[in-house]
Amino acid sequence: MPRRRISVFVALALAAAGVAVAAAPAAAHGFSSVAYVDVVASHDGAVSTTLDLEYDLLVVSAAENQNDQGLFDQGMDLFETGDEATAMNAHADSVAGYVAKRFTVSADGATCTASLAGDITVHIRDDVPYATMLLEHDCPPLTDGETVAHELTSSLFPDSEGYVTDTKTIVTYDLDDQAGSAALDAQNPMFSTEQAWTDRFAEFFLLGAEHLLGGFDHILFLLALIVGSRRLRDVVLAATTFTLAHSVTFLLAALGLVTVPAAVVEPLIALSIAVVAAWYLWGTWRRRRSAVLPEQAVGDVTRTGGRFGLDRADYTRLAVVFAFGLMHGLGFAGALGIQEAWSWTLLWSLLVFNVGIEAVQLGLIALIFPVLTLLRRRAPRVGLWVGVAIAGVVTVMGLFWFVERVLGIE
C-alpha cells in the first residue's frame, strides 16, 4: 500500500479516536453512583436500614431538594478534609429528610415512618467519602402470628437531578424470615420480600449486562481481543482466559480477600486496553516486514506445531490477557463497591451479575468476529487495514485514558 494511503488511514484512525474520546466518558464508572443499603427487621414490626451514600452527591442533592444552602456551603468546605461528618450532623434534618423521601419501607402497602437514629458518620469507600446513617422505620405493629410482606423502594439520586445517571441501589436484607439481596434502579425501583428468587437473580443478570454495555473501556478491551484473533479458537480461548481471570478476582473481592484501590485498578484497565490492541499492531507490522502474503499479514493463517495448535506468541498473549483480566475483575467488583469481607449474602447474586457480563461478551463476539473473518477472507487487504484502524483507535483511547486516570483528570 502506498505510503500516502497509509498516512491517510492513520489520520482517519486518529480522527476517529478523537471523536470517540469526545463522545464517550473517560472512565467507565465515573458518571453513575452506587448506594448500599442493609435492611434488618427489628422489634414489633419495625425495620432498621443502614444506608451508605456518596458524600458529595448527598450534599448537593439534599441541599437542593431541602433548600438548605448552609448544607451545601459547609458540606463542600469540608469535603475531603476528614471532617465531613460535621456538616452531615449539623444539617441532619435536611440529609435525613432527603433520604427518607427517596428510600422507603412499606409493610403490606402501608408506608413506615422513618426517623434518623444516632449520628451520621463518614468513611472512605472506593476511594471517595461515603456517608453512613441509620434510619428506623416505624411500621404497623404485628399481632401474634401475623405475617406481612415488606416492600423497599429506592429513588435515590435520580437522573432528573442532573448530577449522575443510572444510580444503582444494592440492598442486602434480612426480613420476613428470609435473607438475600436485590438491585434497584430507575427501571426496577421496588423490591418485595414476596418477589421470587428468579426475579431477583434476573435483576443482577441485567445489572451485569448493562454494566458491560455501559463500560466503554471493557468493550474496547474485548474489541482488541477480537481484532487480534486469527481463528475462532483464538478468540474463544482469549475470551475464556479473560473470563476465568476476572471471575477469580471478582470472587476474591466478594469474599473480602483482595482489595485494591480504584486509583490503581482503573489506570491498569486503561493500560490493558492499549497493550492488547498494540499487540495486534506490532504483530501485523512484523509480518509485513517479513514480506509474507497479504492474507497472512491479516493473521488469518493456521499455524501448526505446539500443543493445541498454539505457538509461543499465542501462549504469551493468553498470559497477558489473563493478567489484565485480573485487573478487570477488580474493576467489575469496584463497580458494585464489593469490599465487605465474606459477604455470602451477596455472593450468589454477584455471580449472576458476572454471568450477565459474560452473556454480553459472548454476544458481541458472535456478532463481530464472523463479520471480521469474512472480510479478511474475501478482501484480505481491506480486512487487514480495517483491523489496523480499529486497533489504532483502541490503542490511542487506551493510552489517553491511562494518562487521564493516572493524573486524576475528570
Image: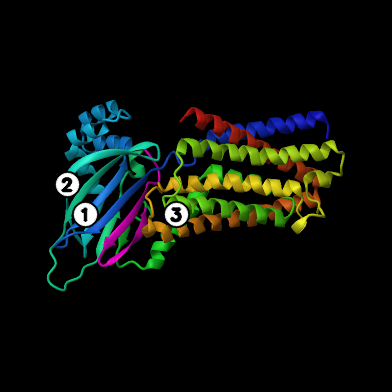
193 or 343, which is in the foreground?
Answer: 343
Report which residue position mark 3 lands on: 207
65 or 46, which is in the foreground?
Answer: 46
> In the image, residue 51 lies at what x, y percent?
28, 47
Which of disc 1 and disc 3 is earlier in sequence?
1
**Is 206 contained in the magenta span?**
no
The quadrant in which residue 56 appears is top left
- Does any portion of residue 25 appear in the rendered image? no
User: Mark 2 and 1 residues: CB-CB less than 8 Å, in contact?
Assistant: yes
**Is 182 contained in the magenta span?**
yes
Please provide the residue range marked out in magenta. 163-184
Which of disc 3 and disc 2 is earlier in sequence?
2
Q: Quadrant of the N terminus?
A: top right
Could you tell me how far apart the alpha carbons at marks 2 and 3 are, in whole angstroms?
A: 32 Å
Mark carried by residue 189: none
Q: Going 38% across and 51% down the picture, which residue do you hit?
A: 341
In the picture provided, is 49 more to the left or to the right than 6? Answer: left
Local secondary structure at mark 1 = strand
Mark 3 or 1: in front is: 1
Mark carried by residue 48: 1
User: What amino acid is at disc 2?
Assistant: Ala
Could you tell me how far apart the alpha carbons at marks 2 and 1 are, in whole angstroms?
A: 9 Å
Could you tell me how far apart the alpha carbons at marks 3 and 1 are, in whole angstroms?
A: 26 Å
In the picture provided, is 256 more to the left or to the right than 38? Answer: right
Local secondary structure at mark 2 = strand
User: What amino acid is at disc 3?
Assistant: Leu
Mark carried by residue 117: 2
Q: Going 65% across and 41% down the picture, which residue do you hit?
A: 276
